[in-house]
Amino acid sequence: MAQQDEPGDRARPTGNSASSGPTDLIISEIGVEKTFPQGSIIVRQGDTPDNFYVVRRGKVKVFRLSEEGIRTDLTELGEGAYFGELAIVTGQPRTASVEAAEETVLTEISREEFDKLLDDNPPLARQIIKQLTQWLVEGDKRLETQVVRQVKVRQISWFDFALIATLSIIFALVFNLYNDNQIPLVQGWGVTDPIQTISAEEALQKYLKDELIVIDARKDGFYQQRHIKDAENFQVVFFDLMSPMFQFKLEHRGATSETPLFVYGGTLSRRFDHDLARALQNLGYENVMVLGRDYDAWEKLFPLVERPAKPPAPMDLGIMGLVEWVPVSIFLFLLIPSVRRSPYLSVFCRLLLGVIFIQFALSKIMRPAVFALNVVDYQMMPAWGVNLWALVLPWAELVAGLFLVLGIRTRTAAIFIGGMNIIFIVGLVNAILHNYPINCGCVGETGEPVNWWKVLKNVGMLLMAVQIVLYDRLFVLDRGGFVWREKKI
């Protein structure tokens, strides 16, 4: 952000040329003429003020450097201008640096000579006071203008959020039309043949009389944790691969095409039981049923087989599995105030988060049906939202990740990613508290087991997003243009 011009090193024309009057003659008599080559530093920010300078020939640049090393050019001064007067008067360290923009000749006046000059020349003292007062007024206006400009440039607008959301939705819908693994926007839309339903009580009566075969449609981890006694486990995700073997098991139990099959899944979206029931109907089984209303009632009514939950085996995510540990180190960096506020840390966070989310997105975009089943595992999404979420979320991850890497709307992209992290953290905590035996589903059908370490990683990524929102200001393409390391005003 632009810094206000500092009076100690900001110069103003004296109003007199090299031969314009007695004051200039006096300065020439008491000063020492010095020549500075182009690029040389004449005074340095933070130095003790010992001299006052008048530009005789050439040009100088006045600039400031922030703690992070960001340079702000304040002004350029030519022949007849002076600088360093306020630092001499107040005795405070110099508040800006001055370098020669070209070969420059200056008159250097010591503190003692400057004090005597003011004592002996009240008109010069009044002129300096008048010009300093004018400078203060102009400086306040300049600061206000720059602050307003920076606020407008860096403020977050609804347009930015709408841009990312719209791009994500458009890409998701268009890509799904041409994807070989296309899924409907809402599971079950367009299905004219509804699945037969049965109440839990009626299903229990038939079960006790051995008049139906019970089929658990959930994934193996849930089935092993708790299932109806004597229920067969058949996962719809493996239907094409395992259907011949499953048919053999049903025939071994005496099942025919007319045998009642009771399918249960027990998830909020009812994704597994309905999908498997339709698949069984397509195999030729005519009497397939699912629970009608309370699809968790089987846990209360039926005899169960229960075992301690076993977390699924961790999947090897390769280098991305290691990269995911890097956000945990953000906790250490945030303990150091100077590092916590560093825009260079923001650039690091942007690149790392962008790469992580782009990788996650690409692994899910090609197989939305698999990701939809992972969404169902968390048992938080209603049926109508599962496919929409599975289609749009990966594209939102991709667009936001690309924006972070490219420096486009970075604060909005960071807020998007932070919001996705919050949702994921809530899902992880819910799964841990309910002891769901699932993988995180971050990378397609693979991922790490859901545990508190996974929560910690995502909290680290959330803090990285917060750091970007608060302190990102380098290499940013924003509404005000591309902001590089050096900011000229």
Image: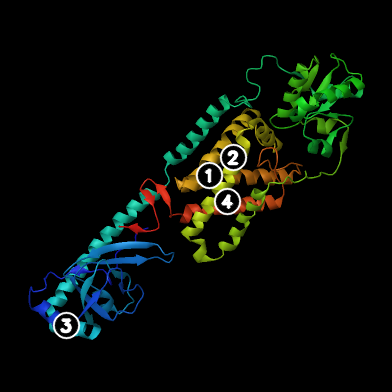
**Residue pictured at 53% horizontal, 51% vertical:** 351
- Residue 435 in the image, given as x and y percentages of width and height: 76, 44
- Residue 405 in the image, given as x and y percentages of width and height: 50, 47
- Residue 355 in the image, given as x and y percentages of width and height: 56, 47
> Label 2 crowding class (10 Å Cα cut-off): few <14, some 14-19, many 20+?
many
Answer with mark 1 or mark 4, whichever residue precedes in sequence.
Answer: 1
**Residue pictured at 48% horizontal, 61% vertical:** 342
Q: Residue beneath label 2, please?
A: 361
What element does badge 1 sit on? helix
Q: Residue beneath label 1, please?
A: 401
Answer with mark 3 or mark 4, whichever residue precedes in sequence.
Answer: 3
Left or right, residue 193 beside residue 166: right
Q: Residue beneath label 4, please?
A: 462
> Label 1 crowding class (10 Å Cα cut-off): few <14, some 14-19, many 20+?
many
Q: Residue beneath label 3, please?
A: 117
Left or right, residue 58 beside residue 67: left
> Label 4 crowding class (10 Å Cα cut-off): few <14, some 14-19, many 20+?
many
Foreground: 157 or 362? 362
| C-alpha span from label 3 to label 2 | 71 Å
**The disc label shown at residue 302, or none:** none
Query: Mark 4–mark 2 contact, CB under 8 Å?
Result: no
What element does badge 3 sit on? helix
